[in-house]
Image: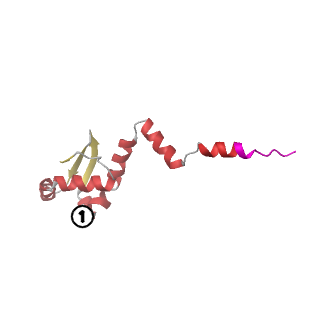
Amino acid sequence: MRYYKKKEEIAKRKAGTQTIGESIKGLLQAYRLEGKLNEVNLVQRWEEIMGKPIALKTQELYFRDQKLFVRLTSAPLKHELNMSKSKVVELLNRAAGHEVVKEVVFL
């Protein structure tokens, strides 16, 4: 004997469903991991955002309190990037889609 569900039961179940993407976003917000995930995403996309020449001279990247710390191996590049900090912050936030970085510190 087969069991068939009533149309009402099927419709009721579909009304309360979410997509997997919505569920994951809700989970990240509930556990307050969304900000950290955005930071990790920016660190991984550093070469794509800033370009290969800058990425080759970057030694270390890390976040602390919405500040991105960038350790560079080239003093002239450090000076040049210090002169355009606001542009770098704007570029990074545009790549993330919203404000993730409030300040950049070049070391």
Magenta-highlighted residues = 1-8
Name the residue located 26 percent from the left edge and 60 percent from the top edge: 50
Q: How many marks?
A: 1
> How many neighbours does mark 1 have within 10 angstroms: few (below 14), some (14-19), or many (20 or more)?
few
Spot occupied by residue 85 in the image (x, y as percentages of width and height):
17, 53
The answer to whether 80 appears left or right of 1 in the picture is left
Whether 51 is among the magenta residues is no
Dominant SS in magenta: loop
Q: Is residue 11 left or right of residue 94?
A: right
Q: Judge from the rendering whether residue 82 lies leftward or rightward of residue 2; answer left or right.
A: left
Q: Is 70 left, or right, of 13 in this rendering?
A: left
Give the x, y percent position of residue 106. 18, 49
Disc 1 target residue: 53
Can you name the residue that lies furthest to the right here?
A: 1
What kind of element bears circle 1?
helix
x and y percentages locating residue 62 in the rendered image: 28, 45
Q: Who's the residue at 26% across and 47% down the image?
A: 101
Front-lying residue, 42 or 90: 90
Q: Residue at x 13, y 55 (%)?
A: 75
In depth, the one of 79 and 89 nearer the eye is: 89
The residue at 65%/42% (across/down) is: 12
Q: Report the amino acid beneath label 1.
A: Pro
Q: Quadrant of residue 9?
A: top right
Q: Is residue 47 above or below residue 17?
A: below
**Furthest residue toward front:** 8
